[in-house]
Amino acid sequence: MPIRRSTIHYGWVIVAIGFLIIFACIGLARYAYTMLLPSMQAGLGLPYDRMGYIGTGNFCGYLLSVVLAPRLIRRFRPRPVIAGSLLLITCSLFAISASHGFLIPLVLYFLVGMGTGFANIPTMALISHWFRSDQRGKAAGLMIGGNGAAIVLAGVLVPQLNRSFGADGWRAGWLLLAICALLVTCLAAWLVRNHPSEMGLEPLGRATPPSPDQLLPREHRGDGLLLLRLGLLYLAFGATFMVYGTFIVTTMVREYGFSEAKAGIYWSWAGFFSLFSGVVFGTISDRIGRKHGLALVFAVQSAAYVLAGLKPGNGGLMLSIALYGSAVFAIPAIMAAAVGDYLGLNRAASAFATITVFFAAGQTVGPALAGVIAKSSGSFSGAYLLAALITALAMLFALCLPRPDPATR
């Protein structure tokens, strides 16, 4: 049956469904935990350290999945891997809503983490196949916006559910998130396509003369060092943004005296600003280059963490949240574009998986270290200031990246 031509390139359909996939596999499955944590802790009767272990279990599952993802993608292609991973997330979220004790939620949230990695890696790798270099940053940024939409939803919805369902509000929350994830699973299985050639299309963007480097997954001298440098930058991002993302609501409640509802509204503003973080900075990186784009994002994040650490009152907190949200998902968007620019289309998925191992390690270690600092000092200020130092160093390190070889684009 011939494919009906449309004035809208199917790459934008991939971006739209990618937005929903990121919304479900990362936004709902991970960032909603920040808002659900207080009521879930009370409902399960667990101390903060065990709730922290449950969160760490999710990160460990994610870390394992990004190691295995390239092999799965090569064997089964992105579409079935994405759909199967979303189904795993959906089933696990349904089960968490009915879980008790400590071990069962830990195992289930570990499985959620695995599903997150298996869905996220192939989704972001689609960018390099469906878009050429001059459009990749913008496309990846639009996809990443799904995280912000989920943060806004969680910040508004979870306090309402807690008021309506009382002690079982967190269970209603996980159940509703599971239903949303199920809908996205069905849409992804229906709409995702692995490559433009399946639709008789070319990638969207300005064409450049083809070269053997584009067509063959060849390695070049210095690629290993380049991946290490990108990985270290991604590690810095993972370690710092999750410190803020995990503990800022707790900081608002404990150190600022906010109610859960007020903290949720503030956290929703972070989600609102993050809706634009990926597309704005991704588009900027299309114009000024990936290394300058990365440096700019790390500079904005450093300012957000300094303000959180110094605690200059409610106005400073709101500015910190706005800065954090405006840049929080820009690094993944730029990284998804950068791997295609630096290493070529056929190596984009494996390269993104490689640097995501660094990211996963950072987001596993960062919150744990922040918890140790907070326990010894009685405040998260020291952790936020340490995060600011790390991102400031990352800004300088990003400026030392080389220019991509145009032949690999």
Image (cartoon, rainbow, N blue to C red):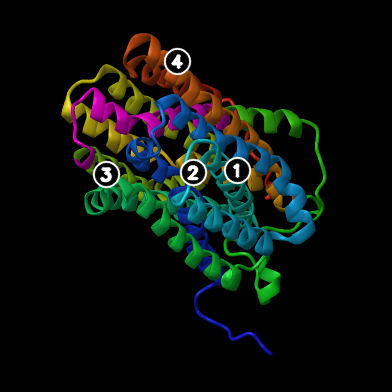
Which of the two labelled residues, at mark 4 and mark 3, occupies the earlier sequence position?
Answer: 3
Amino acid on which the number 3 mark rests in the picture: Trp
The residue wearing badge 4 is 372
- In the rendered image of this protein, does residue 225 appear above or below residue 186? above
Residue 259 x %, y %: 19, 35
Q: Residues within 10 Å of mark 3 (few under 14, many from 20)?
A: many
- What residue appears at the point 64 percent right and 28 percent down from the top-left corner? 229
Specify start and end residues of the magenta stretch as a single range. Answer: 234-261
Answer whether labels 1 and 4 touch (C-beta < 8 Å): no
Residue 387 x %, y %: 43, 21
Q: Residues within 10 Å of mark 1 (few under 14, many from 20)?
A: many
Amino acid on which the number 4 mark rests in the picture: Val
- Compute the Cα span from label 4 to label 3: 28 Å
Left or right position of 399 against 152: right
The residue wearing badge 2 is 285
Label 1 element class: helix
Which of the two labelled residues, at mark 1 and mark 3, occupies the earlier sequence position?
Answer: 3
Q: Residues within 10 Å of mark 2 (few under 14, many from 20)?
A: many
Looking at the picture, tell me which residue is in the foreground, 140 or 79: 79
Answer whether labels 1 and 2 touch (C-beta < 8 Å): yes
Label 2 element class: helix
The residue wearing badge 1 is 338
Answer whether labels 1 and 3 touch (C-beta < 8 Å): no
Which of the two labelled residues, at mark 1 and mark 4, occupies the earlier sequence position?
Answer: 1
Label 3 element class: helix
Which is closer to the viewer, label 1 or label 4? 4
Answer whether labels 3 and 2 touch (C-beta < 8 Å): no
- Compute the Cα span from label 4 to label 2: 36 Å
